[in-house]
Image: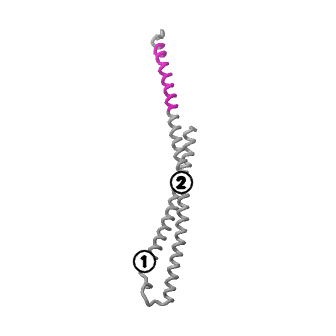
Amino acid sequence: MKRSERIGALANLEQHESDAAARTLADTQRVLRERESVLTDLRRYRDEYLSSSRMRGTGVSIVAFQDYQRFVGRLDEAIAHQSRLVAEAQLQYDARRNEWMTVRSRAASLEKAVERCLKVEQRHDALIEQRRLDEAASRMPRNALRIGSDPAR
């Protein structure tokens, strides 16, 4: 087996790892985007709720006002929790991205090594072919002289 074929097998394995890492990165990015979307929706809902609230007016009972405050508090807790989930997802995304970049770099390096090996092998094969042709050409005049000077003919 030629060196380029051996390194090519390694390059193929590394490419498969790179592809798997890219899929994992895409999944992690999808989770991050979903969590960011939920956080955005929660913030928007809280802002809309606060701006459209009836609590701004007078004549609201204490119980209704306490319910209102509890609900806003729960929204704030949900926003804080979702913010933590977004931060965790961002850390996961960054880690998967670094892993993918590392694997992709190794795959690219191996691919370049395969290309270099192929070039060396092609030059080597061309030299061998040139030697073979030179030998054949150097034998031709001798054979031609022998045939032309053969007294039996």
Circle number at residue 86: none
Tell me where the magenta segment starts and ends, as one range: 123-146
Q: Nearer the viewer, residue 151 or 139?
A: 139
| Residue beneath the point at 56% across and 42% down | 7
Residue 108 x/y as whole percent:
51, 46
| Residue beneath the point at 50% across and 61% down | 29
Say what secondary structure mark 1 lies in. helix
Amino acid carrying label 2: it is Trp
Please, which residue is most extreme toward the front here? 58
Could you classify mark 2 by the number of other residues whose Cα lies within 10 Å: few (under 14), some (14-19), or many (20 or more)? many
| Up-down relation of residue 34 to residue 61 (above or below) | above
Label located before the other in sequence (1 or 2):
1
Nearer mark to the viewer, of 1 and 2: 1
Residue 40 x/y as whole percent:
46, 70
| Residue beneath the point at 53% across and 60% down | 93
Residue highlighted by disc 1: 48
| Up-down relation of residue 40 to residue 28 (above or below) | below
| Up-down relation of residue 43 to residue 111 (above or below) | below
Quadrant, the N terminus: top right
Circle number at residue 100: 2
| Residue beneath the point at 49% across and 88% down | 64
Say what secondary structure mark 2 lies in. helix
| Up-down relation of residue 130 to residue 79 (above or below) | above
Amino acid carrying label 1: it is Glu
Could you classify mark 1 by the number of other residues whose Cα lies within 10 Å: few (under 14), some (14-19), or many (20 or more)? few
The image quadrant of residue 8 is top right
Say whether residue 122 is magenta.
no
Residue 133 x/y as whole percent:
48, 24
Q: Nearer the viewer, residue 29 or 90?
A: 90
Q: Nearer the viewer, residue 37 or 30?
A: 37
The CA distance from mark 1 to mark 2 is 40 Å
